Image: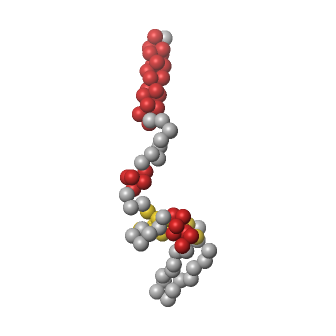
């Protein structure tokens, strides 16, 4: 897909792209240049709602921390028992 830049620096986002990325009239776009390439990303209207479920099924960071601490405590006790 291609679009042309106008004299005022404006361009049209192709309809297929707008439809696929749910870009509407009020969508805010984030523009970046990376290694000479323009990267355009639509930002969600509600970032909190958009991130909901992002970590689903990945376990809890708190649970992981508690498991690691339990292992550390066990090791500390073993070292104390050996007098180290």
Q: Foreground residue, 59 or 75?
A: 59
Determine the residue positioned at 46% across, 10% down. Answer: 81
Residue 84 visible in image: no
Q: Position of residue 26 (x, y in %)?
A: 39, 70
> x and y percent of residue 59 in the render?
48, 35
* Residue at 60%, 77% in the rendered image: 2
Residue 15 in view here = yes
The answer to whether 53 is drawn above or below residue 64 in the figure is below
Q: What colour scheme governs how the chains and residues are painted in the rendered image of this protein?
A: secondary structure
Count of picture labels:
0
- Give left or right: position of 48 versus 7: left
Residue 7 coordinates in the image, percent (x, y): 49, 89
In the rendered image of this protein, does residue 13 appear above or below residue 77? below
Residue shown at the point (44%, 15%) measured from the top left:
77
Q: Position of residue 22 (x, y in %)?
A: 48, 64
- Determine the image quadrant of residue 38: bottom right
Q: Nearer the viewer, residue 29 or 21?
A: 21
What residue is shown at x 47% (from left), y 41% (from top)? Answer: 56
Figure check: 2 above or below 62: below
Q: Quadrant of the N terminus?
A: bottom right
């Amino acid at each position: 897909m291609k679009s042309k830049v106008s004299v005022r620096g404006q361009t049209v986002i192709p309809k297929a792209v707008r439809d696929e990325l749910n870009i509407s009239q009020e969508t805010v776009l984030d523009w970046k240049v990376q290694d000479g390439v323009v990267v355009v990303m639509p930002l969600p209207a509600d970032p909190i709602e958009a991130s909901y479920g992002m970590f689903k099924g990945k376990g809890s960071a708190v649970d992981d921390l508690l498991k690691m601490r339990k292992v550390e405590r066990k090791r500390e006790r073993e070292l104390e028992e050996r007098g180290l």
